[in-house]
Image (cartoon, rainbow, N blue to C red):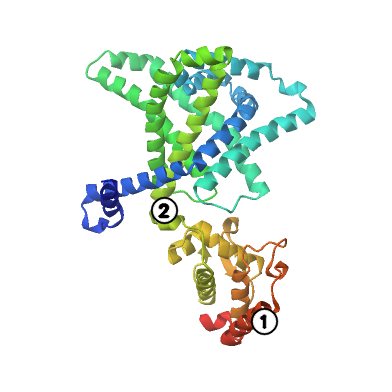
Amino acid sequence: MLNNIQNKITERLWQTNQNEQNWFQAHLTQALRIFYGTIRDLSGGLPSLRSMGLVYTTLLSLVPLLAVSFSVLKGFGAHNQLEPALINLMEPLGEKGIQVSQQIISFVDNMKVGVLGSLGLLFLIITVLSLVKKIESAFNFTWRITVTRNIFQRFSNYLSVILIGPLLLFTAVGITASFNSSTVIDTISSIEPFGTMLLLIGEIIPYILTILSFTLIYILIPNTKVHFKSAAYGAVVATILWKSIGTLFSAFIVDSTNYTAIYSGFAIMIIFMLWIYISWLIILTGASVSYYHQNPDRIPDKSQIIRLSCRLREKLALTVMQLIAKNFHNNEKTWTLNTLAKKTNISEPALMIIMSALLSNDLITTTGHDNQHYLPSQSLENISIKTILAAVRSAEEAPQLCPDDIETAQQVKDLITTLENSITNSVGNKTLRDLV
């Protein structure tokens, strides 16, 4: 029974040609594929572990982050908007959310940046930057990105997020407050059907603002170019999960007497930590949806395989070098890890094993924005086929353990030498130039 269901799902998802379907069927199939890939990631447990790590970093960095935000908002005379925004964020906690928000705000008010001193101020900034760095690391992991920003890019990007974030937050809260308190809006609300329409718009605005916030997060944080459509797709999913799970959390967790009975005075802190964990898990789920929407070829199970056999490594290394050399020789567009993965139909983590080996043996080099484009590091005539095969065959070898460290009989050593000589004789003096 279960096998039949699984076979039908597999046939529906992967053996159906979307070009032969109508608009609705094609989008439904694509949505189910994205859902499948996201659930597979969640069942693997790594998004959950990342969310747990972010809970600790959030608790450690929350007060310093709000202190910096408070200082920025104070410069614009809008620091009074911080508490309403925080209470809105803690809405699923109900009355406990108001208590937590007020307590956090009191901590922020008591933190006087002027008396911290140079060392204390430095620690404050480092704590805030560590939170943003850990968030970027979680998003890069979701997007299968191994190339990180350099120290200068990190500092400028993180500083932009820390300074601009509070302004965006104030703008969102200010728009909502103006909408609810404007006399013009009150006058129009008394006239039907405009009153009903405005009431509906007032209900929709928080969802729109949340979607816009998530969209900006999904575009700005990962160290790659995220398409707006993909970011918005993930943001819509994350917003739906945020609102629905928030309602369930408030109904079944916050109002439950079990936590109070078990944890007593610590119940409010346990519930707060649990909501932070759920919030990060929702955000990372939306990021996973954005990733699969932008990279639908990464959804099938075969794209998740990162183990490469010896012969697959050799063929892949020669293929990659030939592609890079051909485009370089013909002055065509350079290859990136993403484009190479799509061309070879190999997952980026698996392909990175080959690229790392080629980079470490000085056969290719990186260039362009964030060093994400690949070029030959030498003239094509100087890169021998033997060198390429030797580089990829020794991929992931550690200095602490290499073939020479293995005790073996002389007969085995002679046989290995014969095999090595056979490879050398078979490729002869062929170079990468011969493959172009």
Left or right for 138, reference 117: left
How far apart in space, not on screen, are marks 1 and 2 (Cα)? 48 Å
- Residue depicted at x 65% and y 27%: 64
Is residue 211 left or right of 406 when viewed as pictured?
Answer: left
Nearer to me, 43 or 217: 43
User: What is the x, y in percent for residue 173?
Assistant: 47, 23
Tell me if residue 244 comes above or below residue 372 in the rendering.
Answer: above
Query: Which amino acid type corresponds to the residue marked 1 in the rendered image?
Result: Asp
Question: Mark 1 highlights which residue?
Answer: 414
Q: Secondary structure at mark 1?
A: helix
The local crowd at label 2, few if under 14, some if 14 to 19, many if 20 or more residues have their Cα within 10 Å, is some
Q: Which mark is residue 111?
A: none
Give percent across and percent down for residue 100: 55, 17
Q: Position of residue 52 (x, y in %)?
A: 55, 34
Q: Are marks 1 and 2 in contact (CB under 8 Å)?
A: no
Three-letter code, disc 2: Asn
Q: Which of these two is toward me, 235 or 35?
A: 35
Q: Quadrant of residue 234?
A: top left
Picture disc at residue 295:
2
Q: Secondary structure at mark 2?
A: loop
**Can residue 101 be seen at all in this image of the molecule?**
no
Label 1 crowd (10 A; few <14 / some 14-19 / many >=20): few
Q: Earlier in the sequence, mark 1 or mark 2?
A: 2
How many numbered badges does the structure rendering display? 2
Q: Is residue 418 visible?
A: yes
Q: Nearer the viewer, residue 161 or 62?
A: 62
Give left or right: position of 258 versus 64.
left
- In the image shown, does 434 or 38 lie closer to the viewer? 38
